[in-house]
Amino acid sequence: QKEVEQDPGPLSVPEGAIVSLNCTYSNSAFQYFMWYRQYSRKGPELLMYTYSSGNKEDGRFTAQVDKSSKYISLFIRDSQPSDSATYLCAISNTGNQFYFGTGTSLTVIP
Amino acid sequence: DSGVTQTPKHLITATGQRVTLRCSPRSGDLSVYWYQQSLDQGLQFLIQYYNGEERAKGNILERFSAQQFPDLHSELNLSSLELGDSALYFCASSETIYNEQFFGPGTRLTVL
């Protein structure tokens, strides 16, 4: 079983839609949860960084962690064509090991 | 621009050869991470250094090695290259081992 699983998509939505991206993980010891955005052939860019359960909001982006279900989500409100990219979830346990999801490809259609 | 630099941007070499990839972390960051990203494997954690010392190992092959120098830049050495080593290699840095990572632009390695 992989440490983190992510639906690869692809996901295609109209401009202005609410996007929901999700990952599940296997080990309850993971404490740090991250979302990265990666444009084609570029380095991943950190979007959100959270520790433990709860919600964190930054502009149009909301990260949600449910440790009881081992489930993390990223919501994008009022999606824009510039949000078209691959989104990677990542988890870590006290900084020793890092595991990334395989990424979800998102296309926002104008 | 994340502040992490990687050289070279592109590298084309032949099977059996050895290459060195270089990474300079953001100013003030003590921790450096190396990742491999291929189409079918996603982003794979290879190795982490903190202030010159190896901190954690991921899925790094024995043909691969890395080090972090006193000025905190890092090098990833790939030897006896195989076709399957063709991938994007990313370096990331963080202030400490508990902070978020910032990624460089990557080195695209093609093994022919």
Image: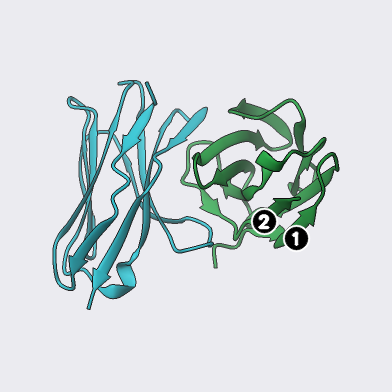
Chain colours: A cyan, B green
In the shown orientation, is residue B16 left or right of residue B108? right
User: Residue under circle 1?
Assistant: B8
Classed neighbour count for the residue bearing mark 1: other residues with Cα under 10 Å, few (<14), some (14–19), many (≥20): some
- Which sits in the foreground, A5 or B51? A5
Tell me where residue A37 appears, x and y as whole percent: 39, 57
Residue B97 position in % (x across, y down): 54, 36
Position of residue A51 in the picture relative to residue A15 (left or right): right
Q: Nearer the viewer, residue B101 or B78?
A: B78
- Circle 2: is it few (<14), some (14-19), or many (20+) Cα within 10 Å? many
Q: Earlier in the sequence, mark 2 or mark 1?
A: 1
Q: Which residue extends farthest right? A: B17
Label 2: state its secondary structure.
strand
Q: Which mark is residue B107?
A: 2
Vertical order, A52 against B28 (above or below): above
Query: How far from the left and from the top, in percent, is residue B49?
Result: 66, 35
Location of the N terminus of chain A by quadrant is: top left
User: Which residue type carries mark 1?
Assistant: Pro
Q: In this view, which residue lies farthest toward the left?
A: A17
Instruction: Return the chain for callout 1.
Output: B
**Three-letter amino acid code at the position of disc 2:** Thr
Mark 2 touching mark 1, by CB under 8 A?
A: yes
User: In 3D space, how far apart are the residues under numbered discs 2 and 1 (Cα atoms)?
Assistant: 6 Å
What residue is drawn where x is 63% and y is 42%? B34
Q: Residue at x 32, y 46 (%)?
A: A8
The residue under the point 14% across, 61% down is A18
